[in-house]
Image: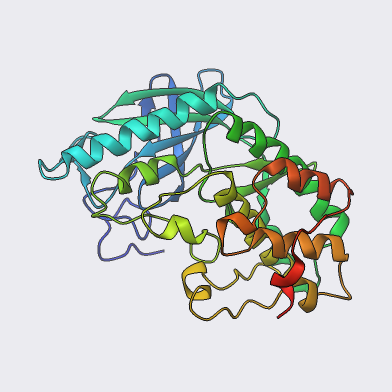
Amino acid sequence: MSSSPDSPPNSPPGCPADCPPLPEGYQLYGYRIERMLSRGGFSIAYMASDSAGTPVVVKEYLPIQMARRAAGSQALIVSSASQGKFNHGMRSFLEEARLLARISHPNIVAVLDFSKANNTSYIVMRYEDGRSLEEYLHRLRESGRKIREDLLRNVFVRLLSGLREVHSQKLLHLDLKPANIYLRKDGHPVLLDFGAARWGLGSPDGSLGNIYTRGYAAPEQQGSGEGMGPWTDIYAIGATLYACLDTGQAPQAADLRMNADEVEPAQRRWAKAYSLQLLELIDWCMQIPVRARPQSVYALQKVLNGELLDLVDPAWFRK
């Protein structure tokens, strides 16, 4: 496999030449870097191992728009013009780690350690063996199958239990989607990749813009970020459930829906395939107006556990 033109010969394809990942074998406070798992615009995730050989995941704060590796070193160099924004994002990154480290919940990724090195920060998390919900949906699509409602309910009841605990710590996820929901081999979900650091980067002066995943992000998340709350993650839960029924296809982005809504209500599109209760829940979560959505995760848990959904005004789904 050849490297991309922007990558050095020993870097994975797609890695910028001035921002390669940490090399295999690199020692970081007793953790050995094994290989890069994934790369986003603001961080790199690595497979690593601790001193006992136990696998862990290490997440490195590395916003590629603002930082690069020093020549012959793993330390980051940040321009003076970007230093303030870089530091603000790193503080958010570490605050996310501190908050998550306080949460002990079977459906939230466990933070084991966090530290500073190489002029940046790192979060060490428990390694989970399994696959993402996105991968599972892809396999279903390839085989021409649809996801079963009982499986969907079991996954999301547990997921919402974890998200409720996160919200109780005054933390929002802000990037809920199938790729960030991991399914262990026993089928139990784990919520990954919280978006706090990305929002920290967008907040000082807005010059980088807010980072979000189109199709899953709530409309208030795509503007200034004002007015966000649990209902912001709840929109993403609805969009994720909608995508699950559509075997992984994200619904129309919220900003486009505000001008010309082309999202067919779930209870009309899948009327004969899934229960009305589940479909009503999805449409409820995906309402554009903040106050038209459920205001807490607890309301969703009640429905997915089988309690009846009491719609105050069902007019919104009659399209």
Query: Residue 136's image quarter?
Result: bottom right
Residue 145 left/right relative to 316: right
Q: Position of residue 34 (x, y in %)?
A: 46, 36
Instruction: Give the colour scheme of this rendering.
Output: rainbow
Does 186 appear above or below 213?
above
Quarter of the image containing the C terminus?
bottom right
x and y, in percent, of residue 27 in the image: 37, 25
Q: Is residue 292 above or below residue 84?
A: below
Please, which residue is most extreme toward the left here?
Answer: 80
Q: In front: 283, or 26?
A: 283
Q: Residue at x 80, y 55 (%)?
A: 152
What residue appears at the point 41 percent right and 28 percent down from the top-left corner? 95
Residue 190: name its quadrant.
top right
- Which residue is located at x 64 percent, y 39 percent? 163
Q: Is residue 12 left or right of residue 46?
A: left
**Who is closer to the viewer here, 79 or 25?**
79
Where, quadrant-wise, is the N terminus in this rendering? Answer: bottom left
Image location of residue 262, percent across then percent down: 60, 81
